[in-house]
Amino acid sequence: MKKLNVAMIGYQFMGRAHSNAWRQVGRFFDPPIEPVMKVMCGRNPEAVRDAARKLGWEETSTSWEDVVSRDDVDAIDICTPGDSHMPIALAAARAGKAILCEKPLANTVDEAEKMLAAAEAAGVPHMLCHNYRRAPAVALAKRMIDEGRIGRIRHYRGTYLQDWILDPDFPRVWRLEKAKAGSGALGDIGSHSLDLARYLVGEISEVSGLLETFVKERPLEDGSGRGKVDVDDAALALVRFENGAVGSIEGTRFAPGRKNYNRFEINGSRGSLAFDLERMNELQVYEENGPDSGFRTILATDAAHPYVDGWWPPGHILGYEHTFTHTVLDFLHAVHRNAPVAPSFEDGVKNQRVLDAIERSAASRTWETI
Amino acid sequence: MKKLNVAMIGYQFMGRAHSNAWRQVGRFFDPPIEPVMKVMCGRNPEAVRDAARKLGWEETSTSWEDVVSRDDVDAIDICTPGDSHMPIALAAARAGKAILCEKPLANTVDEAEKMLAAAEAAGVPHMLCHNYRRAPAVALAKRMIDEGRIGRIRHYRGTYLQDWILDPDFPRVWRLEKAKAGSGALGDIGSHSLDLARYLVGEISEVSGLLETFVKERPLEDGSGRGKVDVDDAALALVRFENGAVGSIEGTRFAPGRKNYNRFEINGSRGSLAFDLERMNELQVYEENGPDSGFRTILATDAAHPYVDGWWPPGHILGYEHTFTHTVLDFLHAVHRNAPVAPSFEDGVKNQRVLDAIERSAASRTWETI
Amino acid sequence: MKKLNVAMIGYQFMGRAHSNAWRQVGRFFDPPIEPVMKVMCGRNPEAVRDAARKLGWEETSTSWEDVVSRDDVDAIDICTPGDSHMPIALAAARAGKAILCEKPLANTVDEAEKMLAAAEAAGVPHMLCHNYRRAPAVALAKRMIDEGRIGRIRHYRGTYLQDWILDPDFPRVWRLEKAKAGSGALGDIGSHSLDLARYLVGEISEVSGLLETFVKERPLEDGSGRGKVDVDDAALALVRFENGAVGSIEGTRFAPGRKNYNRFEINGSRGSLAFDLERMNELQVYEENGPDSGFRTILATDAAHPYVDGWWPPGHILGYEHTFTHTVLDFLHAVHRNAPVAPSFEDGVKNQRVLDAIERSAASRTWETI
Amino acid sequence: MKKLNVAMIGYQFMGRAHSNAWRQVGRFFDPPIEPVMKVMCGRNPEAVRDAARKLGWEETSTSWEDVVSRDDVDAIDICTPGDSHMPIALAAARAGKAILCEKPLANTVDEAEKMLAAAEAAGVPHMLCHNYRRAPAVALAKRMIDEGRIGRIRHYRGTYLQDWILDPDFPRVWRLEKAKAGSGALGDIGSHSLDLARYLVGEISEVSGLLETFVKERPLEDGSGRGKVDVDDAALALVRFENGAVGSIEGTRFAPGRKNYNRFEINGSRGSLAFDLERMNELQVYEENGPDSGFRTILATDAAHPYVDGWWPPGHILGYEHTFTHTVLDFLHAVHRNAPVAPSFEDGVKNQRVLDAIERSAASRTWETI
């Protein structure tokens, strides 16, 4: 079978999740190309060696520039913080590598556009890893919408709630620094709600946004005092879609008890759908059919549900990391067929434009168009 | 025992709910005054006679002006559409009657302010019937917040979702006419979300609103063709509270499968609360206390919970109309003690100002202050 | 309209619930006969006078023998502990009164059979108050079963869990005395699970039972020391139905956190149904229809659902006591039409025979046939 | 690091699940020994080669006798149908191999006892794979019980409901043949309920059982007609525990809509616990603490919860196969320390004795002691 030599840049949380996907995809599915976990790259040589050994990579490197230009590397998987996505992707595109990039695509619209332009100019396959699109229940929601099961969509209600920085003495990690993360809850988790909105409902035309930082200073990680939090703790937006639907999107890290509550509800003219990532294997569906109608819980674990035929019998639930495996599977298909795959860098640009409009609106205190 | 002769103006949905409360309050509680269901008033003499007989009123009348000026009437309960609230309340205040008024207090801020001024000038007891404040689970939420159980509040998320006009051939009833109802989902159900926000979180300082009418024409009730729907089908708002909390409020009649989904979630610095009217007897509570914390469901049916000691043993749930009985109970206490009771007409004015700001914001496309 | 003079024997928990039903039935429904709350009877003259005033009865008496023989009394509603059901019912039947009797019909099979024989000999209407049959969601379950929606029934799983005597220092009230209550959890709450089993599935042919008393002594109510608990704290049974279904029935007062958890699940050849009294307005339904099937929650508050048209619009939930109102409504129809109504005393006899078989089985340690 | 050469006998459903565990355990945890996936064994040479390639085994064999006697094999993982567990385990023990055996340990008590005796005589590590003990939420339940959080246990209610053979034309697969599977729902899924009962509550002293076969004939897999189903479709039992608790255990394959509904509820003197495998990451806990108590949902995904520190941050749920990874992890620790690990073959024997007593009781129609 044709092989694809993969290099991963980054090795922390997302590095672990993507590595597992590369390792597992061929154990449960039949990808048309066999991925080879060639080299893992990170700045700290010892740490990257430990990670590579643990996660199953053949070699390590401390220079992404070297890795990206290696002839024996076919694809680059970018798992670093957002501020380095653009330079890596630009170099990878120039070197003709297929690119899988963790979300958000970039920290600004400008960077995202440059990445898209570079990938298109080079003609390389490019994919953005918004993994939740490939939870079976979410992909099933998409299928049901496309089949017209809930009719014309009128409402989208997306919230992504977490509570991991509730403690005001939680340190100012990189995700709380604008220079590295671009934004706070907005880009980290609000962007998931937004991506699902675009995936399931359609393009957004205008937004009214609100950003808030509840804890404005936090201890520095090196113990040298306290530093400013210059990103949002919470981001809320009202949105209008091009198709006439209206909605709301929210991301916050200040919702006690909500650990990973990426929830949406969609109301159409004939039915409704609801999903909550904490119960990732379930899709709530309402189809209007008289007084005995009701929301039903589809346990999206049947072989007929998207991606499930690779796994277990009905009722044997999947976990978080499986969504990455499905992403990598579709990336391999796209590379094999040399065909576009969604979400692509174009989706990344579109997402970034909406995030940008929300930030502008929060500043201007008026609706902003995309 | 002292008695209170009550006159009810109106006899439809709210008339039935309030009548039940007047009848039942003394059967389960010990009000300090005994209400006498003296006279029910409505324009259609036959219909009001039928209703009065069914609902337990001694007499009927077709003139609210007469009723309001009767010496043997002590209190006026206003259950008519919003466009008639002001004239009735003004006359009742002038005649020195205690007034209970169904929400929304009025169709405009101006009307609401006049009603408050009249009631205060006359020194009569006045109460606004926002009955959901007195669901035991909601009153328990208020108590827990006041006790500091969830700390400082940062988020309010209120949605009131229904689906009763989903069918585009559902007729243009009075609730869909601006002249009678004032507004659509905004004033009818969004106002409940708003009132609970003010009750549980505090005063709102500014809003960004969005109004949408999905079905712009509907069959007239008299079969004479189709008429314009000039109220909103859906109303959404981002809100900022004076205490620094941020939130969202939504009312829609276009959410298939949501029958009476008046839901809120509140996140504080130490915990969270959530409530859904369709499961009215339950309060979801999260108190942060280490890794074994979790949202728990309090079945608010214990004698220690607000209003429950009048009813049944734990686990024997209450229904929708009980919330009106609790409202009437507290109205009777207020009349007896000649003391203010919340929500009062002042709350009605404040609610109306926020509703008005949402409407203004939807038109101006900018944030509006209250 | 024809009137029915009602006398109630007993005035405590069940007396309150039944009184409310007599008062309310005509306010929300159109019964063919108007009930008159004539006389309430109890042994303590002061207590019964207080109760009658509170609950709306015209007169009081301390002698049920007098009441039962009054010419101006048409119907007897028996709300006393089980040990007095038989003498009252026998006298009422002899006097030609219609009889509504709170469950369980009697404390023994023999008593129950005598009551049925007396009522049949006298030709009087007789009804057993197993109120949960008339929760709209339960009546809807019955309708769906009768329509064949879940096919041939194979499994019934009934549990009625409470926790009100969990504290070992909770006193030995009458419900814990065999002489008064007949049995413990078995007759008090297990009998509800059993009655629903017979209503929804069919007649039971044989049982294997287990009874357990966890707390064998408790403080006496008069403070004079401790007394023996001679009834069961928990009762479990495996059952076989005549139609081939198998099942289990359980009642316990030792399930912390379960306040009134009267739950059943029924599995048929084409679908399943589930109900929980703590969420009394909901029916869970599964209809097998391919991989996108799922349990759906019917909020049984639509006018098309049993009994709901008398009450409120969809989504406005009903409470515990409404089930008694529905019972009284059907009793009035039965009296009016002089027609049998279920559950009748015959159901009471059949229930008692199963309860008796469970007790016998618990002693014999073998399966017992009914 | 020390290595352990593993041979797997069997390669179907359980083979896939166990293989994944061997592959993944070192990627997420730090086992003290490194497992080497040496050889996979099955009767069909082509099928086993395909499976081995897919699942990551170095070699294949068609003779378990050969494999078990190889010097370069240290551990045997038995994943075949129950009728072959004993001969394989006996040979493995004689050869001094560590043994991991899929449940049920054997098809009869006699076989199970022989397996235990052989393992003990040989002094080899032995473990039974009852994987659900190692779902984090279940292991957390065990920890909370051991800490006394729910007090003395009085009730266990275990049901394992599935619906995969609901269709009467589903073929007579090996799990429906007594000669291969030993029993039907009883040994396949009821045994899980039973094992959790013994794990969480304690030893069972006596049982009253019921077995039922609803569909008595099914199409043969080879299309040659219909064959008899000689195992139970549903198994129910009442049980008494040595510590005084009472309970029920049920397994059925005829519960439409229940895909993998392995649920238990445990009631103690101070609280309750409930778990449902379809929501495997959640544990419901009730701790009695006054009127504001309620069942809370612990999302068992915190690093402080059993096994979770190897995986992802809070709220990132685990899937079905992770339970096997945890099992293999503990097996490796046991082999390394040469220490017993539960569940062992001794647990397998005890489980088998209870299953046997249920079968005897179903035949004798009386309670049977273990």
Image: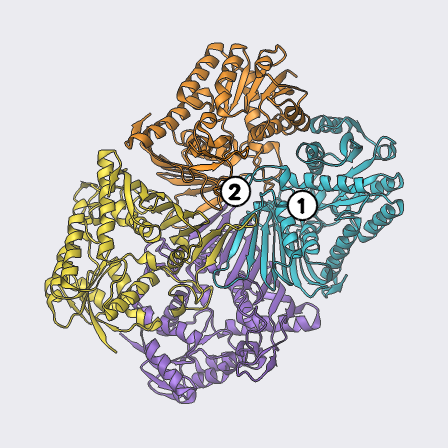
Chain colours: A orange, B yellow, C purple, D cyan
* Mark 1 neighbour class, 10 Å CA radius: few under 14, some 14 to 19, many 20 or more: many
Q: Quadrant of the N terminus of chain D?
A: top right
Compared to residue C154, the image places residue C214 above or below, namely: below
| In-front residue for pair B96/D276 | B96
Query: Would you place residue B97 above or below residue A293 in this image?
Result: below
At 60% across and 50% down in the image, what residue appears? D254
Residue found 53% across the figure and 59% down from its top: C264
Q: CA distance from mark 2 to mark 1?
A: 19 Å
- Which element carries disc 2, helix, strand or loop? helix
The quadrant holding residue D55 is top right
Q: Nearer the viewer, mark 2 or mark 1?
A: 1
Up the image or down, B304 lies above or below D103; here it is: below
Pointer 1 residue: D134
Percent x, y for residue C131? 45, 67
Q: Tell which subunit mark 1 falls on.
A: D
Left or right? Give the position of C262 relative to B337.
right
Relative to B14, is A51 on the left or the right? right
User: Mark 2 near mark 1, Cβ–Cβ under 8 Å?
Assistant: no
Apparent side of residue D43 relative to residue C43 in the rendered image (left or right): right
Residue A4 visible in the picture: yes
From where the camera sits, is residue B108 visible? no
Looking at the image, the residue that sits furthest to the front is A224
Chain letter of the residue carrying label 2: A
Q: Nearer the viewer, residue C26 or A256?
A: A256
Q: Quadrant of the C terminus of chain D?
A: bottom right
Q: Residue at x 59, y 37 (%)?
A: D312
Instruction: Give the residue type at disc 1.
Output: Arg
| Horizontal and vertical percent position of residue D363 | 74, 61
Report the disc number at residue B83. none
The three-letter code of the residue at mark 2 reads: Arg
The residue wearing badge 2 is A279
- Place of residue B91 in the rendered image (x, y in percent of width and height, measured from the top left): 12, 61
